[in-house]
Amino acid sequence: MEQSYRIFNSIDELSQFFAEKLASLVKEIPPGRFFSIALSGGSTPRLVFKYMASNFRDRIDWQKVLVFWGDERCVAPESDESNFRMAKESLLEHVPIPANNIFRIKGEADPNVEADRYAEAVRQHVPSTLNIPQFDFIMLGLGEDGHTASMFPGNLHLFSSDKLFEVTENPNTKQKRITATGKMINQARHVVFLVTGESKAEMVSCIIERKDDWQKLPASKIHPENGELLWLLDDRAAMKLNVFIR
Ligand code: 6PG
């Protein structure tokens, strides 16, 4: 696994780097092949998506991109909690991506039924390696509690699950979630954490610098064995990192 960190002074600089990386990876895809990406949710990606909608509408061949989600809240797509709605409004309706290239997790459906349906949809559209769909690119965020996607602390069994997607629950709100499991995330070619804000600084330092009970945290279990793990941080999220990494 190749692991690296980049620290940026602003969300625009982080977004520019992220979008340029995505654009170059999509460009490398041979004709007739699709580029598969799993989006993350929450507030951080929204700003990145808006930047891409404004600056990369014509710099990415969206026809070649298949969009999935790494997790979704079990809510209707119209809900302001929906990761699909956030991505649709901040990015997808502003770029020329075919509707058939967008595979949302149906938050309004029965969670267990949908987790299995979605897993099958991923299997059908994302080529597998060793019988696990291998995404070209997976975006992840980091919660202040060390969760990522919707894999929360106390649920490390999700890294040994043979399922591609499982139903989880936000321990604070009891909101049901559908999340990609650890094995599928760790199968991806490029896994990119996007973490911003001072509120994440302690957790960023804990995981990257392996402090305290770091091994109990889901985000610390993300290590794409045969891929790249890249941390994109703003300077506030990185403020507690040791100098050697900066
Ligand atoms: C979600 C996300 C979740 C998110 C982190 C960070 O559905 O909420 O997938 O894992 O990435 O909670 O969220 P923020 O970027 O909003 O801090």
Image (cartoon, rainbow, N blue to C red):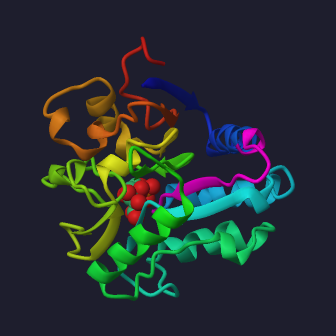
Residue located 40% across and 88% down the image: 108
The percent position of residue 212, horizontal first and vertical second, equals: 14, 29
Q: In this view, does 42 lie to the left or right of 211?
A: right
Q: Residue at x 33, y 28 (%)?
A: 208
| Residue extent of the magenta highlight | 26-42
Count of picture labels: 0
Q: Is 36 left or right of 91, judged from the image as shown? A: left
The answer to whether residue 69 is magenta is no
Is the residue 18 above or below the residue 164 in the image? above
Residue 54, percent across and down? 80, 58
Residue located at (31% from left, 55% from top): 181
Q: In which quarter of the image is the N terminus?
A: top left
Q: Ligand 1 quadrant?
A: bottom left
User: Residue placed at 32% from the left, 47% from the top?
Assistant: 183
Q: To which quarter of the image does residue 202 belong? A: top left
Quick check: 19 above or below 239?
below
Q: Residue 158, located in which quarter of the rendered image?
A: bottom left
In the image, is 39 to the left or to the right of 92?
left
